[in-house]
Structures are given as C-alpha cells and as structure tokens.
Amino acid sequence: MAFDLEKIHGAFAVDDKFVQALPYGTGHINDTYKMDCAASSYIVQRLNTSIFRRPEALMENFRRVTAHIAEKIAAEKSDRQTLRLVSARADGKPFFRDGEGNFWRCYHFVGGARTYDILETPEQAFQAASAFGQFQCDLADLERLDETIPDFHNTPVRLKNLENAIRADRCGRLGEVAREVDFVMSRAADCRILTDLQSEGKLAERTTHNDTKLNNVLIGETSQRAVCVIDLDTTMPGLPHYDFGDMVRTGTSPAAEDERDLSKVGMRFGMFEALLRGYLSRAKFLNPLEKELLPFSGKLITLEIGIRFLTDYLEGDVYFKTKRPGHNLDRCRTQLKLVESIEAQLDAMKKLNDSIALA
Ligand code: ADP
Ligand code: GN1
Ligand code: MG
C-alpha cells in the first residue's frame, strides 16, 4: 500500500520542509520510513494495529519510557540518547490517526549511527548488550507499564498456539514440517522453566524491552559505541531473561535470521562471551538465580521465536512480514539450528557465566 507521506509530515509539528520519505530498515511488523526534511531527518512509522491492538496505551508506555530515560541521561550528562517523539500538530498527542484509521508516529532520526542485522565484532556485541542492560537499569524505578501484549514471552502459551496451529493445519503444510514439530515437542519441558519459576515466586517481573534484536540498538559509526536503544513497542513487564535471550539469538550467529544454508548458522562463543560481559557490566540488579539462568535464556528465546515462525508458517504467514514462499519456515529452521548449537555449548556457557562476578 502506498501512503502520502508528505501529508503525514503535515500532521506532525515538524517545522522543516518535506523532501522525501523512503521505506527504511528490516523490521517484520511496522512500516518504517526515513523522512528527510530540508534541515534534518525523522523516522515515521505506521504501527501495525492488528498486532498492537491498544496503540494509545502503547504510546503512553513509549512516552513514559523515553521521558524517564531522558531524565537519567540529563542527570549523568552522558552522550547516549533516547528516542524523541514529535507531537501531532492538531492535538499535541504523540501520534496521529489518519482518515483511513492508520496509526502514525514520528520521532527524530538519530544521525551518525546505524543498526546491524548481523553483528561484525565482539566489541559491537559488548556495546549492544551493555546498552540493553543499562536500559533495564534505567527503568528499574519506573512504575509498572501497561502490558500491551499479554503473554508476549510466555513460552508455554506460544507452544499451545503452535499445538492449535498443528491441529487446525489450515494451509495443509503440516506434512512438510514433521521434523521441526518433533524438534520442538521434544523440548516442551524447557518451555515451562522460567514461567514456572515465576509462578512459584522465585523470579520477579521487571520492566524489560522484550524485542532486543541486535538491530534494535543504534551503534555510532565512528565511535562504535551503542548510542540509542530503539523499537520500544514491546517495552513492558517481563523477565530480564527475555532480553538477554533475544540478544543471544540475534547476536551470536554469523548468518541472517532467514539464511537457507543452515551450515552457516551457529552460536559463536566469543560473541556470547561479549554479550554476557556487556550485559553483566550494567545489569547489577540481577539476583543469583536470575544470573544463573542467563545462558539457558539464550536457548529458550531462540526456541520460542522458532516456535512463533513455525506457527505463522502453519497459519499461512499472517503475522510476520514475508518476502518469499517458505520465508517463515526458513526463519524457523535457522532458529532450531541455533538452538542445537547453543545446546552443544550450554555447559561451557554456564561455566563462563559462573566465572564472572556481578559486583
Ligand atoms: P520495527 O518495529 O519495524 O523493527 P524499528 O523501530 O526497529 O521498527 O525501526 C526500523 C529501523 O529503522 C531500525 O532497525 C533502525 O535501522 C531504523 N531506526 C529506527 N529508529 C531510528 C532513529 N530514531 N534514528 C535512526 N534510525 C532509526
Ligand atoms: C519482530 O519488529 P521486529 O522485526 O523488531 C517481533 C519480535 C520477534 C522478531 C523476530 C512485536 O520484531 O517479537 O522476535 O520480529 N516483534 C513483535 O525477528 O512481534
Ligand atoms: Mg526493530
């Protein structure tokens, strides 16, 4: 669908002449555009409201999170940044709903920085993980956010959704995925570990980002330092493991999430070590049990996202944006291959984790 981005520009309090707006980034959910104006640039996004069903509550979370982090940054006089929303011209709200019901938001483009779909160096991994650790730290004293997508990282619920998709087999694709289904089902017990500990009161909810794909942190082109954590749509109550686990999922493999040559997929131990050291350098609030479960969280979240890609494949590719037939199945297969690779190294990952002191 083509949108008149110049009109959307007019809806926001951007006092800068519109030049162009082009699709930007590789996100799977929202439509993102980089809008260039005469003096500076902006990010304009159309929120996917079939996934984010309460967009106003989401934007209230977004506003509270960015205001809270901005205060912390100001107090410490650091060069790190947070997203800065632009208000709608008509009513001052941090979003604009157009005549067709599309939900738009706009914020300042952070220049001189970029994201990486595949991390290139352990230093980038260290930087990105310390930025997400700092993010959790910054939000530790924020009042509870609205849980805009309930059960977002509830792995047993994700598994149940897969079981429902298997039973329905709406697209007649089940025959193709017998191996993947077996792989997941033989690990069903893993899916419960964190949620069971939480129900038993042994793990406590915190404010977490919940989508810590490594391309959701901007890294300074020259400084190579993490500049800004972005993509705050799922920032809400969660377990810190969801964030660390997704860093391991997206930061350790040298292959793309949708790579078809599975021989290229695997966990690079050096990248894991850099993520762990970066994260622990800031996540001082973790208690011993939380810390102990970090290596396992890498396996769990990789399995969970594999389950979600498989479910979407069986349901006819209705959730994640896809660019080719079988795209979600390709993505599922890379995740499961990565799970295997993590399993093979889990003992060494735990040993390393035990050897690092928190304080
Ligand atoms: P999605 O939810 O679709 O993943 P993101 O919010 O992550 O959307 O944005 C998509 C991409 O746009 C990011 O990966 C990043 O490259 C770029 N981006 C987003 N916000 C900014 C910003 N404020 N400044 C510069 N680049 C940004
Ligand atoms: C989606 O929007 P994006 O591309 O950063 C998804 C994440 C998945 C990820 C898999 C709201 O993230 O949960 O881990 O794809 N976001 C949502 O790449 O479902
Ligand atoms: Mg993103």
Image: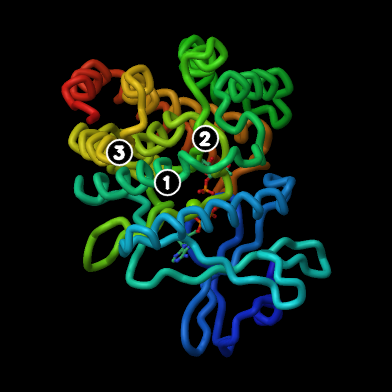
For label 3, the crowd category at 10 Å Cα-Cα, with few meaning under 14, some 14 to 19 and many 20 or more, is many
Tell me which residue sits at (39%, 53%) in the image.
217
Q: Which circle, 1 or 3, is nearer the viewer? A: 1
Judging from the image, what secondary structure is the residue with disc 2 in? helix
Q: Earlier in the sequence, mark 1 or mark 3?
A: 1
Q: Earlier in the sequence, mark 1 or mark 2?
A: 1
Quadrant of the snapshot with the N terminus: bottom right
User: Which of the 4 quarters of the picture holds residue 33?
Assistant: bottom right
The residue under label 1 is 138
Separation (CA) of disc 3 from disc 2: 31 Å
User: Which of the 4 quarters of the picture holds residue 137?
Assistant: top left
Tell me which residue sits at (40%, 62%) in the image.
74
Q: Which mark is residue 279?
A: 3
Amino acid type indicated by mark 1: Asp
Please say if the residues under marks 1 and 3 sit with CB atoms less than 8 Å apart: no
* Horizontal arrangement in the rendering, residue 100 relative to residue 198 (left or right): right
Judging from the image, what secondary structure is the residue with disc 3 in? helix
Q: Nearer the viewer, residue 212 or 25?
A: 212
Q: Nearer the viewer, residue 340 or 358?
A: 358
Q: Which circle, 3 or 2, is nearer the viewer? A: 3
Q: Nearer the viewer, residue 169 or 217?
A: 217
* Horizontal arrangement in the rendering, residue 147 relative to residue 336 (left or right): right
The residue under label 2 is 329
Q: Is residue 296 above or below residue 150?
A: above
Amino acid type indicated by mark 2: Leu
Please provide percent x and percent y for residue 123.
20, 49
User: Which of the 4 quarters of the picture holds residue 73?
Assistant: bottom left
For label 1, the crowd category at 10 Å Cα-Cα, with few meaning under 14, some 14 to 19 and many 20 or more, is some
Residue farthest to the right, as pictured? 99
For label 2, the crowd category at 10 Å Cα-Cα, with few meaning under 14, some 14 to 19 and many 20 or more, is many
Q: Which circle, 1 or 2, is nearer the viewer? A: 1
Please provide percent x and percent y for residue 272.
25, 34
